[in-house]
Image: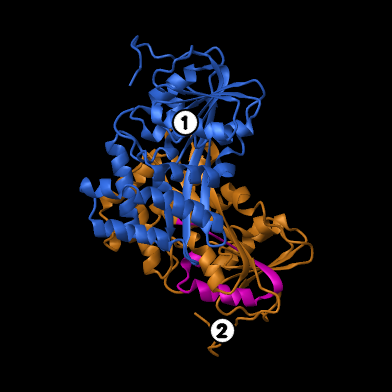
Chain colours: A orange, B blue
């Protein structure tokens, strides 16, 4: 991993990721289910926010979920245990140097990971090579440039921009959702199909007002306050005005929009595009 | 109508509206069909870009399509005739003073109209009163603030902003799509449900690259070039760079996103919220 994980590793962040997974399950996961007996690699599982959903939706598939952070893997393991999962192995490992033979998996699943990587195409190439020929890879990412709302607010956009700039300074890209198609193509993945998953929130959708606008998106922006101010990206008053404006969109006449992107492709049959540099692609 | 119709009335604009309707028919219309015998008011039909689709999808409903511009009605009539429509009456009339008794219609349909109005809530109130109690109103609008793309380009956003500012100067609102829910609620429309209709375009979707990114959205932005420069909103070089950047998103690694919003509500049974000012709400 290049740079720090901008969202941090605090208890509140765990809660946010859990909220996010809970609210968005249908939107993001409803068309992902793996056949009985298939071997699935979840790359970058973090604290396991998606793992429980993934494993429950495909109870007869065998999951291997990896993350580079031992602390995250520990938390993911506790979560899997308390959910009673029996079809997942959790393991500390680096996406850029997975400890498995090439072609070990039927499917790969990557969710909210590429946004943090300085070399997302390399990651995708390596993950593609973890697939048997014909195996599929599913990638889900958000895109913070997809956030717009009513009432509109320049301060809110400035606060969001802080998150985007911090992510960029950490080597990542918060605007990656819209780029999934070209990134997957560049990584030599075949039959790529990307579909947007738009979260539209007005006050008739109380679950999303609370679960998405407040506790997922706005909480994430609030979470970078100290970093953003310390980095000189924004004045405290401006940041706080932006956060207030985001909360304002949760009132009766407010609207909030955000889009996730989900890409699915496959390792083409008989095709190999392993990189020829001869050096291990560790990070 | 307040101010000028910012898109203009030229032949190219007619073509653009036709392209837009052709490409987006399924996305916008697939869930709109009216029962046999029902009376439908299409308010602000313009040159009839939606009229042919509407009437064909509900061949046994009776449509009345109005527009304030006699020229547009003339063009819409020619189009309806050449499509062989027999279930539509085209008529010059003002949305703010419709020449029909209240409660005359079972359904109202309004598409790409509110964005041009200085008083969209009043328009909705008047249209609501054209409905029998329990009748439905369907509203479709775009939102130019929903446009984002890859590669990203500040110049492209500046060029888009010119269209937004010209629309605003003409009394309209190019960011109206996201506001449909609160506007319809404010107009006293009941059971409002808004759904986004996102157009996602990557190079695997050749029809949309050509039909939407190039010939609908970018053509619309290009169409305000002279006005924007004359109004001092932008330097010619900057505008042209923005348009080039929009075309750039149609290349193999480019992506373009835009969202329409569709709201459906009804005139509540036995409820009347006619405005009590006592004066006719003509424009």
Q: Chain of mark 2?
A: A
**Which residues lie in the magenta part?**
A114-143
Judge whether A177 appears above or below B182 on screen: below
Residue at 52% x, 60% y is B202
Which image quarter holds the N terminus of chain B? top left
Residue at 53% x, 14% y is B104
Locate residue B278 relative to residue B234 in the image: left or right: right
Q: Are marks 2 and 1 in contact (CB under 8 Å)?
A: no
* Numbered mark located on residue B116 in the image: none
| Quarter of the view holding residue B85 | top right
Q: Classify mark 1: helix, strand or loop.
A: loop
Q: Is residue B155 visible?
A: yes
Residue indicated by mark 2: A275
How many other residues sit within 10 Å of disc 1, few (<14), some (14-19) or many (≥20)? Answer: many
Residue A201 lies, in percent from the top left, at 49, 40
Q: Classify mark 2: helix, strand or loop.
A: loop
How many other residues sit within 10 Å of disc 2, few (<14), some (14-19) or many (≥20)? Answer: few
Query: Observer-nearest residue: A107 or A68?
Result: A107
Between the residue at mark 2 and the residue at mark 1, the CA separation in whole angstroms equals 56 Å
Extreme residue in the bottom direction = A278
Query: Observer-nearest residue: A110 or A210?
Result: A110
Residue indicated by mark 1: B45
């Amino acid at each position: 991993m290049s740079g720090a994980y901008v969202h941090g590793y605090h208890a509140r962040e765990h809660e946010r990721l859990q909220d996010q997974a809970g609210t968005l399950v249908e939107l993001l996961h409803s068309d992902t289910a793996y056949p009985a007996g298939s071997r699935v690699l979840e790359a970058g599982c973090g604290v396991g926010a998606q793992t429980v959903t993934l494993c429950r939706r495909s109870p007869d598939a065998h999951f291997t979920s990896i993350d580079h952070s031992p602390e995250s893997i520990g938390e993911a393991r506790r979560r899997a245990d308390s959910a009673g999962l029996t079809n997942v192995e959790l393991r500390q490992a680096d996406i850029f140097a997975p400890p498995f033979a090439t072609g070990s998996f039927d499917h790969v699943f990557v969710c909210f990971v590429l946004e943090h990587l300085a070399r997302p195409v390399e990651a995708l190439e390596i993950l593609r090579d973890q697939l048997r020929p014909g195996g599929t890879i599913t990638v889900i990412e958000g895109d913070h440039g997809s956030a717009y709302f009513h009432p509109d607010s320049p301060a809110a956009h400035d606060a969001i921009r802080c998150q985007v700039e911090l992510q960029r300074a950490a080597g990542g890209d918060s605007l990656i959702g819209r780029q999934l198609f070209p990134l997957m193509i560049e990584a030599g993945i075949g039959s790529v199909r990307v579909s947007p998953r738009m979260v539209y929130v007005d006050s008739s959708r109380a679950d999303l007002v609370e679960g998405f606008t407040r506790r997922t998106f706005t909480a994430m922006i609030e979470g970078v306050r100290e970093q953003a101010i310390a980095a000189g990206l924004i004045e405290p008053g401006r940041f706080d005005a932006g956060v207030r404006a985001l909360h304002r969109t949760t009132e009766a006449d407010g609207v909030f929009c955000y889009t996730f992107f989900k890409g699915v492709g496959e390792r083409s049959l008989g095709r190999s595009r392993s990189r020829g540099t001869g050096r291990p692609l560790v990070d």
